[in-house]
Image (cartoon, rainbow, N blue to C red):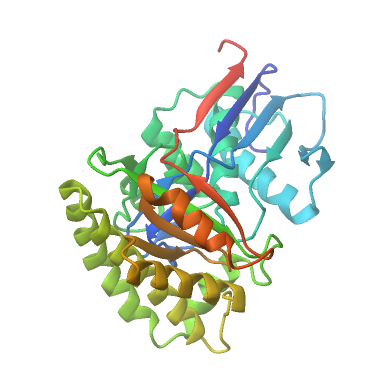
Amino acid sequence: MIGARVRETGWATAVAHPNIALVKYWGKRDESWILPVNGSLSMTLDIFPTTTTVRVDPSIAADIVSVDGRSAPRAAANRVSEFLDLVRTLADSNARAMVDTVNTVPTGAGLASSASGFAALAMAAAHAYGLALDRRDLSRLARRGSGSACRSVYGGFVEWHAGRGTGCAGNDSSYAEQIDATSLDAAMVIALVDHRPKPVPSRIAMRHTAATSPLYRAWVESCTDDLARIRAAIAAGDLGLVGRIAEHNALGMHATMLAARPAVRYLLARSLAVLDRIVWLRECGVAVHATVDAGPNVVALCGRADADEVAAALGELGDDVTTHVAAPGPPATLLAGDPR
């Protein structure tokens, strides 16, 4: 039993948006607490929200989890229940809950669906179980469900501090916070080349890359420099330099995966076609750079004034490529809930 006391019924609905990392998170120093090997930095999008409702119900014997109106697959439902166990421990409750999630981002396709999902779940569950958490504590909680979810707790440009140590000490020092990027007029163009869930989930691919790739340690070391340089570029309002750092960091991460034994390969021929088109756009004078999370879909970082041109150029690659334009988005938000 998790807690000796069953709390009264509570409910809440929250919405969160995915984020795309510019300096990537790819590897944990502590698996159980989801503590990263290196710090990372991302932009929260204003598209593809996830909306989650949590209803605490002491009368049910097990959590009930639905996604888009259907019962969640067992593995996904178990992951949600494990996360709710963390919330119940903090709340001193053993009451189970009904969780209903509506996703508008392709799930498991490398577009941070777990980030928006667990950020929304963390906010809704914390309120439903009566926890009073500030945003930094909420980011720590969301991190326990999916590392990158800690960044989706905030809007705009967000840094996730790696922190130091493991266990409780590491937990205290590893959190996300928003950084000032008002001098950037940034947009992201999402080039969807494959909506399907990727063949190797991020958690498995991450662990395998860290354990077997001879390039992994060098990439992690480069992330420290990338993070310092991209912070300075954001402060200076130099979007072109931000893009160059992000592109190098992303391609380096995918190189470490290709060097794993056996290789983890997410990029498809269509992904490479998008990357080639971005290089061509730069040669034509458009300030645009690429980043790719753990999946086949490519994201183009550019100025807002260039976003429509970039989207049109990428859309010309054929029906297999669909584009969506995103600006910096809002933080995770509580939409409704009982007053607690």
Horizontal side, residue 15 vs residue 275: left or right: right
In the depicted view, which residue is nearer to us: 130 or 286? 286
Question: Is the N terminus in the top left, top right, bottom left or bottom right quadrant?
Answer: top right
* Quadrant position of residue 35: bottom left
* Quadrant position of residue 93: top right
Q: Position of residue 251 (x, y in %)?
A: 41, 74
In the depicted view, which residue is nearer to us: 89 or 44? 44
Q: Position of residue 163 (x, y in %)?
A: 30, 54
Q: Position of residue 297 (x, y in %)?
A: 57, 64
Horizontal side, residue 289 vs residue 203: left or right: left
Whether 243 is drawn above or below 133: the answer is below
Question: Is the C terminus in the top left, top right, bottom left or bottom right quadrant?
Answer: top right
Whether 33 is drawn above or below 213: the answer is above
Horizontal side, residue 151 vs residue 87: left or right: left
Which residue: 34% across, 63% down? 246
In the depicted view, which residue is nearer to us: 49 or 87? 49
Whether 304 is drawn above or below 233: the answer is above
Q: Is there any visible trace of residue 171 in the rendered image?
A: no
Q: Position of residue 67 (x, y in %)?
A: 76, 42
Whether 131 is drawn above or below 175: the answer is above
Which residue: 17% across, 54% down? 232
* Quadrant position of residue 233: bottom left
